[in-house]
Image: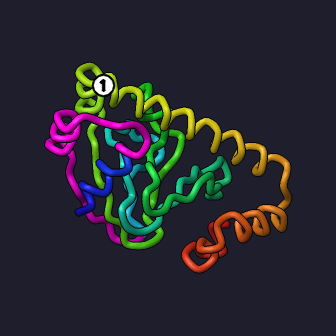
Amino acid sequence: MPLDTYLSFLSQIHPLSDECLGEVHEVLSLKQYPKKHFLVKQGETVDEVFFITKGCVREFFTDDNTDEICTWFGFEHDIALPTHGFLIQQPSFTSIQAIEDVEAVILKRGDLENLYQKYHELERVGRILAEMYLIQNEENRIILQTYNAKQKYEFLIKKHPETIQRIPLSYM
């Protein structure tokens, strides 16, 4: 079922042929992560994309004072990956950690690249997802740089009220 949820998610972005969906399905895996488990640690090279089917994750980095700075929260139907570490295969600037027990569909970078070469319709899905991510990233960057703590909290309540029950206040 979770693998089908991921395939449906992709198909909603742009129609995919049955052949493409079949090959994507063959290379997907499903993993369970307990609360507090690191899907990715800062400084690691990342070769997996995580599609969250259950649970919640946070992305954060540890600064020079060993303070943890949260940059993003991911929920069901979100794609979680540290883009720098994944795209250019360099050590990740951020960690991704389960806030709750997490179930995720996994797609390996090499499999994704092979599928992109073979199926341009899937490559289009990747481009559209990248555009969506860039829009979200710009919004988050403006909020993080211009809102004070109270405004950030109010924005979160207004835009994502479910997060208040799921994310510890210390992470906000």
Q: Amino acid at mark 1?
A: Tyr
Q: Find residue 143 and report its horizontal and vertical position in percent.
A: 77, 50
Whether residue 74 is situated above or below residue 49 in the rendered picture:
below
21 relative to 137 in the view: left or right: left
Q: Find residue 159 and report its horizontal and vertical position in percent.
A: 69, 63
> If the image is split into quadrants, where does the C terminus sit?
bottom right
Whether residue 159 is situated above or below residue 112 in the rendered picture:
below
The image quarter in which residue 35 lies: bottom left
Secondary-structure class at tag 1: helix
- Image point 44% across, 62% down: which residue? 76
Disc 1 target residue:
116
21 relative to 46 in the view: left or right: left
Which range is magenta?
11-35
Q: Find residue 127 and report its horizontal and vertical position in percent.
A: 47, 29
Whether residue 137 is situated above or below residue 124 in the rendered picture:
below
Q: Residues within 10 Å of mark 1 (few under 14, many from 20)?
A: some
> If the image is split into quadrants, where does the N terminus sit?
bottom left
The image quarter in which residue 102 lies: bottom left
41 relative to 64 in the view: left or right: left
The image quarter in which residue 87 lies: top left
- Image point 79% across, 68% down: which residue? 154
Q: Find residue 30 and report its horizontal and vertical position in percent.
A: 23, 57
